[in-house]
Amino acid sequence: MAHGAIGLLTTHDLALSEIASGGRGGENVHFEDSGDDGRLAFDYRLRPGVVLRSNVLNIVRMLGLEPSS
């Protein structure tokens, strides 16, 4: 960071998002998605913060599986 480096990390592990909020110059951002009509679509607009919902149930259904309740 002191030398002007930049980088991008992507993860599904929400525990890692705490690193960016730890005051080291990082920032959490996310994309929104929709799972309409059995398809998963992203809008590719970066929004601040950690994503607040999961798309895993849409993915499971797209694979032809029915999630258990």
Image (tube, grey):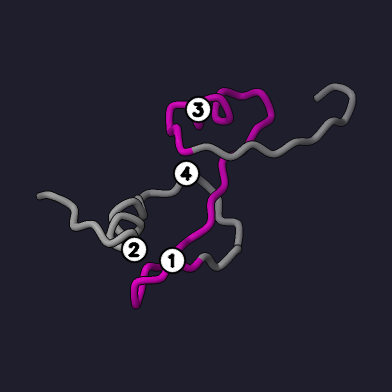
Q: Mark 4 points at which residue?
A: 50
Mark 3 or mark 2, which is nearer the start of the sequence?
A: 3
Front tag of 1 and 4: 1
Mark 3 or mark 1, which is nearer the start of the sequence?
A: 3
Label 2 SS: helix
Residue at 35% of width from left, 57% of height from top? 59
Nearer-the-camera pick, 10 or 49:
10
What is the total number of numbered labels drawn onto the structure image?
Answer: 4
Q: Residue 62 carries which label?
A: 2
Quadrant hosting residue 57: bottom left
Instruction: Give how far apart the Cα atoms at labels 2 and 4 are.
Output: 24 Å
Front tag of 1 and 2: 2
Nearer-the-camera pick, 54 or 37:
37
The percent coordinates of residue 5 (x first, y second) are 84, 31
The percent coordinates of residue 28 (x first, y second) are 56, 41
Mark 4 or mark 3, which is nearer the start of the sequence?
A: 3
Instruction: Give how far apart the Cα atoms at labels 1 and 4 are.
Output: 19 Å
**Is residue 31 on the magenta stretch?**
yes
Residue type beneath disc 3: Leu
* Magenta-tinted stretch: 12-41
Asked whether the beta carbons under mark 1 and mark 2 sit within 8 Å of each other, the answer is yes
40 on left or right of 61: right
Residue type beneath disc 4: Val
Label 1 SS: loop
Residue type beneath disc 2: Met
Mark 4 or mark 2, which is nearer the start of the sequence?
A: 4
> Quick one: which residue is furthest to the left in this view?
69
Q: Name the residue under label 1.
A: 40
Q: Which mark is residue 16?
A: 3
Quadrant hosting residue 64: bottom left
Front tag of 2 and 4: 2
Instruction: Give how far apart the Cα atoms at labels 1 and 2 are.
Output: 8 Å
